[in-house]
Image (cartoon, rainbow, N blue to C red):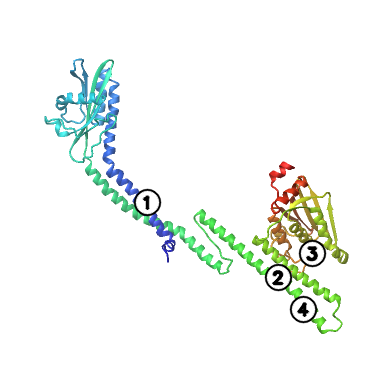
Amino acid sequence: MTGRERGNRIGIQWKMYAILILFIVLIVGVLWFFQAQMMNYFYQMAKFTELELSAAAITTELDDREMLEEVMADHASEYYQDIWVYHITKDGDADLVADAKGTGELTIPFMTRKFSVFYDKAVANEGLYIAMVPMEQFHEDLELHIVQDNSGEPSAYPFFRGNSGRVCAVYVKIHQINGEQYMMIQSTELTPIRAMVSALKDLALWVGFILSVVALFIAWLMSRLITKPIVKMNEAAKSLAQGRYDANFYGKGYREINELADTLNYASRELAKTDRLQKELISNISHDLRTPLTMIKGYGEVMRDIPGENTSENIQIIIDETSRLSQLVNDMLDLSRIQAGTRKPEYSLFSLTETVRETLTRYERLVMQDGYRIEFIADADARVLADRGMILQVVYNLINNAVNYTGEDRFVSVRQELSSDRVRISITDTGEGIAEDQLAMIWERYYKVDKVHKRAAVGTGLGLSIVKGILELHHAAYGVQSRVGHGSVFWFELPTANADPEYLEADYEAEPNEPPSERDKTEKG
């Protein structure tokens, strides 16, 4: 057994387990990445965004001392910041305009000592300097130690990857207001989040475990709901394969499974119908084969055993039955070739009207001896581009059908109706008619409306199936109208060749097996 065959034998339940577990692993992995690996980055970006928003709000109030102090106090308290605003004089000195404390740290002495350092770095960095300074430097008079800043990239935020020690973010911005220069310094603590990250890792593991258990239960439940009707349909399909066409496919719960069940039930009904028709076909063919063979054998034995019975009449009966037997075999072969797709139309331009008249000459003996009346009504000559032999066979079989089922008056009417681009041939009988619910079935092989097989007066009983196959090969319209007690009308339509006959004949000579295109007909017509 190959790996692919083993894979195909895995059930829906285990495949759902695998898919859900992979999905959970993906979700937990994404959560772990963003929470454990990217948490520090998102935290620092959020703090820098707070500093930037506060700076923008405070800048708008630099002209109003009272409002400036109020806004600074609000932002210091809300965002846990220390804020200083200095006025830079023309001789380079700095006067403290206002300050606000939100951290509670004693950072003012530190800022006083390091003011010039931050000012020089901000001037050198396009007026904006962001640095991260260890918190212990706010309490000791040490040389300024910067763990990270935005030097060289004024528009970018620095990023500190350390998880140990307390770090303060210092945000320095120089403003020009009404010709005066101001410098704003903001500081806020970046709290170490190593413990939080560790907790989030543990949380991700627990979440993954719980979700895995839940996924297993969901996969089991869903697989039960899905596979239960499939298993039942599989058992019904096995019984169907064994010839029990009454198998019932039952689907419940899902639209796709219900549709599959409906399709399988339809297939079961169609197979039952096909099986029934096949049995009728075998029975009817056996009957039609046995009758001429019995008569040939009987008349042959009579002519052999009884002196004086070797007459031309007996010989003619044997010839007629042999012809009927040969016609039955030929019709079966024709029908098999049509249904197998090996018989293709060979298109030619011909008169459909004359073809119908030629077909009617075959019934002269039937008209003279048995009293049938076959009437042909045509108002004009209709030319078509089709396979003449096939269309002649269609007309012949439809007339045979009408002769076999016409009423006691033995009258059959053949009518041609010609329109601008189509010609319709209708064959009408005066028989008992066909019930509406059986009209679709009459085109099947050996289908009998009355279910009683009788020997046809002419033909073999396969005519309507051959008619259907030939007309569908020509993509022609066909049909039947019938009412019980009022006879039946069988009809078919073909496009007329209304273009220049000389052009159509030339076109046919160039491509004998293909009809001229509609575009060519339009251009030449």
- The CA distance from mark 4 to mark 2 is 18 Å
Mark closer to the observer (3, 4):
4
- Numbered label attached to residue 297: 4
Q: Residue 36 location, x and y as percent?
A: 27, 44
- The CA distance from mark 3 to mark 1 is 71 Å
- Going by the numbered disc 3, the residue's amino acid type is Asn
Label 3: element kind: helix
Residue ID for mark 3: 404
**In the picture provided, is 246 more to the left or to the right than 79?**
right
Q: Earlier in the sequence, mark 3 or mark 1?
A: 1
Residue ID for mark 2: 285
Whether residue 451 appears in this view of the structure is: no
Q: Residue 347 location, x and y as percent?
A: 72, 54
Of residues 523 and 70, the one nearer the viewer is 523
Q: Earlier in the sequence, mark 3 or mark 2?
A: 2
Q: Earlier in the sequence, mark 4 or mark 2?
A: 2
332 in relation to 179, above or below: below
Residue at 30%, 21% in the rendered image: 60
Residue ID for mark 1: 23
Q: What is the quadrant of residue 270 in the picture?
A: bottom right
CB atoms at circles 3 and 1 under 8 Å apart?
no
Of residues 362 and 425, the one nearer the viewer is 362
Q: Earlier in the sequence, mark 2 or mark 1?
A: 1
